[in-house]
Amino acid sequence: MNKFTTLTAKAAPLDIANVDTDMIIPKQFLRTIKRSGLGVHAFDDMRYLDDGKLNPDFILNKPEYQGAEILVAGDNFGCGSSREHAPWALADMGFKCIIAPSFADIFFNNSFKNGILLITLPKDDVQKLMDDAAKGQDLTIDLEFQTIHRGNNETMKFDIDPFRKHCLLNGLDDIGLTMEHKSKIEEFEADIATKRSWL
């Protein structure tokens, strides 16, 4: 998993509440266990017209938001079923950080495990960042200092669980966390092999 330290990037506004995981990645695309290749199907029902062409009215299809790495979203983002494909699709689409007033719990956990920083802020602050994104202003996220720097030089602070922060700063997924204890695991295995050689 890639480390997340600081990110200065274009932000895209998705001012829709209750975006559920089926909206993020519809059920017909859940037939893979690969984390790559799902980005093209993210927001499929809103993103494409019936003939398969891009919907020019969908906000994330607009030229000014191509390449955005920060998504500023509405309340209760990621609700619905507990599909891990949702953060996979968002990450494959290029998003590294999502800011919203609230997130569904399972989506929240899955996103952090897949290297996406989720930031919860009061609705008024999210609206300010939504407006910044609409104006084409980049945002800078500094995870170490837990700050968001806006284009007008205002700085917002955000809270994050220390353990999740540690994992993102060091690029640690569940396997990486296990490998932090590699020497102890190897010591245990050697000890067991000596004491219980019949195993």
Image (cartoon, rainbow, N blue to C red):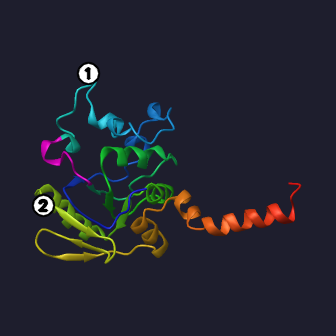
95 vs 192, left or right, is left
Which mark, by number, is residue 51? 1
Q: Position of residue 102 (x, y in %)?
A: 39, 63
What residue do we see at 16% from left, 76% from top?
A: 154
Could you tell me which secondary element the residue under label 2 belongs to? loop
Amino acid type shown at disc 1: Asp
Q: Residue placed farthest to the top in the image? A: 51
In the rendered image, the vertical position of residue 182 relative to residue 111, given as above or below: below
Stretch of the chain drawn in magenta: 62-69
Say which quadrant the N terminus sits in.
Answer: bottom left
Mark 1 vs mark 2, foreground winner is 2
Question: Which mark is drawn over residue 106?
Answer: none
Query: Which label belongs to residue 137?
Result: 2
Q: Earlier in the sequence, mark 1 or mark 2?
A: 1
Q: Position of residue 84 (x, y in %)?
A: 49, 47
Q: Is residue 146 left or right of residue 63?
A: right
**Relative to residue 28, is residue 163 depicted above or below?**
below
Q: Is residue 110 above or below residue 101?
A: above
Q: Is residue 10 left or right of residue 135?
A: right
Sort mark 2 into few (<14), some (14-19) or many (20+) by Cα contacts within 10 Å.
some
The amino acid sitting under disc 2 is Gln
Q: Nearer the viewer, residue 68 or 71?
A: 68
Q: Is residue 197 magenta?
A: no
User: What secondary structure prevails in the magenta region?
Assistant: loop
User: Where residue 156 sits: x, y (%)?
Assistant: 24, 75
Report if residue 63 lies within the magenta region: yes
Label 1, secondary structure: give it. Answer: loop
